[in-house]
Image: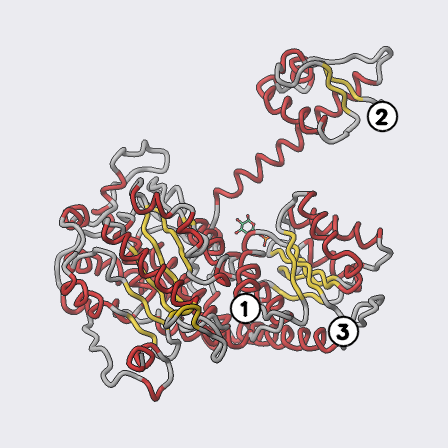
Amino acid sequence: MAALSGLCSSSPSLKPKHDRVVIPLFRKYSLAFPTRSNSCSKLSVSGEVSADLSKTNSVGVLKKAKQGGLEKDPKALWRRYVNWLYQHKELGLYLDVSRIGFSDEFVAEMEPRFHAAFQAIEDLEKGAIANPDEGRMVGHYWLRNAKLAPKPFLQVQIEKTLDAICKFADDVISGKIKPPSSPEGRFTQILSVGIGGSALGPQFVAEALAPDNPPLKIRFIDNTDPGGIDHQIAQLGPELASTLVIVISKSGGTPETRNGLLEVQKAFREAGLDFSKQGVAITQENSLLDNTARIEGWVARFPMFDWVGGRTSEMSAVGLLPAALQGIDIREMLVGASMMDNATRSSVLKDNPAALLALCWYWACDGVGSKDMVILPYKDSLLLFSRYLQQLVMESLGKEFDLDGNRVNQGISVYGNKGSTDQHAYIQQLREGVHNFFVTFIEVLRDRPPGHDWELEPGVTCGDYLFGMLQGTRSALYANDRESVTVTVQEVTPRSVGALVALYERAVGLYASLVNINAYHQPGVEAGKKAAGEVLALQKRVLAVLNEASCKDPVEPLTLEEVAERCHAPEDIEMIYKIIEHMAANDRALIAEGDCGSPNSLKVFLGECNLDELYA
Ligand SMILES: O=P(O)(O)OC[C@H]1O[C@H](O)[C@H](O)[C@@H](O)[C@@H]1O
């Protein structure tokens, strides 16, 4: 036992005697490697996709090497484990890639791609326009080490914002900044309104790190679901008077967030509270949200920077302000991230855990996303890590075109909750069913704070069971040729969480370079938003048509076809049916006669006629 804790501890006195000898991999091999333009079929943006394009994106030896199968000899496997084990001593973080079956030939063949990827990351950190489509720099790495920022004014912005966050959080927690009409005389709750990258990081960190009794408890409105919003507000009850509402939106114009804000402001009005005395905005300067907050005189405003993307904004005000208000040590989060950033700057593959992850992803997914990434933290507090990674990985990597305009339909699907809970849900399929995934186990060595554990049977604690479940599942999956990566941390602390975030941010950036895509834009998201806008515009036309018919005397009920005709949108009849069905279910003064199950039988009119609108 003593030997084990010595091996795994980050305490300097318990360090292993010999450092692992690192062989600079990229000097060892000098195999020829096809250039990117040779290795990828050149297709024009408008060109047809080759059915087998995916295979041309894989390095040549990939398929051949895979046919060899996974190493099963225990001695050879142990050698592989020891040979490839990555350790970050100071962070107490380990990465085991031995259960991914890549071969030395594959590693060698990936060398030129990694060279290019390391160069791209170096350029990005120096301020290159790493998001070419949007002409933006990508600077989330500067947030945890402002000295890296390419311009002095950026450095000042970062440091000033961090100081302002810490001071504001201290003032709120101490009661220096307080709500005007709360009996407690201080803020007790945070209601965070935001979506996507403006919610997922804060949600993950709150679940992972908030103390049992935080100075302020946090709740989230991360959708435009009226039921969900009502639930959050109802749960706050009278504590609305002591709730600090943080509205987070980089663009400051995201509809779901705007709606959440309007709903919360209505609740404040109804409770006789002044929202402006309890509202905080985190957004880009001069955005709609920023201007609203400034004009209405909200309690505080914090900036989001143009060069920080939503999904990599956890170390900006987006993640740091809510965390600080919950009593989480945000400077420690930044230290953890910065230490990991240093490690993942190495251009020696074996020394760079993010590069090792990217290598594993490429191998497991054939460089084309052919397998899903199942994230299994064996720790309840890390439950939301997979949801956080879903956006980070899928919004970054899920791209139709590569940087040369070839249609590649890249991406890696991410899902997972936690172990051992998931063992009683879907691990059956992972072990025996369709083989379309690889697993990432997240192992946390410390079960409980020192002095709190006890043996629930001789020699065995509750945490030993969790440990056994993880190891058992890893072995059972591997025995059936299911590959896995294991990331091990000592404890879930602000430092280790910061490091995990930074590890995956870098792995995504490197992997994006390996497959030659822009990880920092999200053109596909616009399509859904645009379509949603069109639905709402159509709904307004439907209402106008129905109003006109309903103002006639006698009222003229219309069939769906007639509504569609009068909206000049016969091709949208199905959408018109869905609009009417939704409005009818929500007491919108709309009367639908007939059977909703037989749409052609429906006749629709409004229960009241609005003459003002008719003649507007
Ligand atoms: O922070 P916001 O501007 O409100 O954006 C929130 C989210 O909106 C979009 O859907 C983007 O695809 C996400 O990357 C972003 O995080």
CB at mark 1 closer than 8 A to ligand 1? Answer: no
Q: At label 2, which amino acid type do we have?
A: Asn
Secondary structure under tag 1 reads helix
For residue 584, which numbered disc appears in the image?
Answer: none
Secondary structure under tag 3 reads loop
Distance between mark 3 and mark 2 Cα atoms: 47 Å
Question: Which quadrant of the figure has residue 589?
Answer: top right
Give left or right: position of 550 versus 114: right
Question: Toward the viewer: 376 or 240?
Answer: 376
Tell me which residue sits at (63%, 12%) in the image. 600
Q: Which residue is mark 2?
A: 610
Question: Toward the viewer: 19 or 46?
Answer: 19
Question: Which quadrant of the figure has residue 468?
Answer: bottom left
Mark 3 or mark 1, which has the lower sequence index? 3
Tell me which residue sits at (40%, 64%) in the image. 124
Say which of marks 3 and 1 sits in front: 1
Q: At label 3, which amino acid type do we have?
A: Ile
Say which of marks 3 and 2 sits in front: 3
Distance between mark 3 and mark 1 Cα atoms: 24 Å
For residue 209, which numbered disc appears in the image?
Answer: 1
For residue 177, which numbered disc appears in the image?
Answer: 3
Secondary structure under tag 2 reads loop
Tell me which residue sits at (76%, 76%) in the image. 175
Question: Toward the viewer: 603 or 152?
Answer: 603
Relative to 276, residue 554 above or below? above
- Quarter of the image that includes the N terminus: bottom left
Mark 3 or mark 2, which has the lower sequence index? 3
Tell me which residue sits at (84%, 54%) in the image. 271
Residue count near mark 2 (Cα–Cα under 10 Å), binned few <14, some 14–19, many ≥20? some
Q: Position of residue 425 (x, y in %)?
A: 42, 46
Give left or right: position of 230 versus 367: right
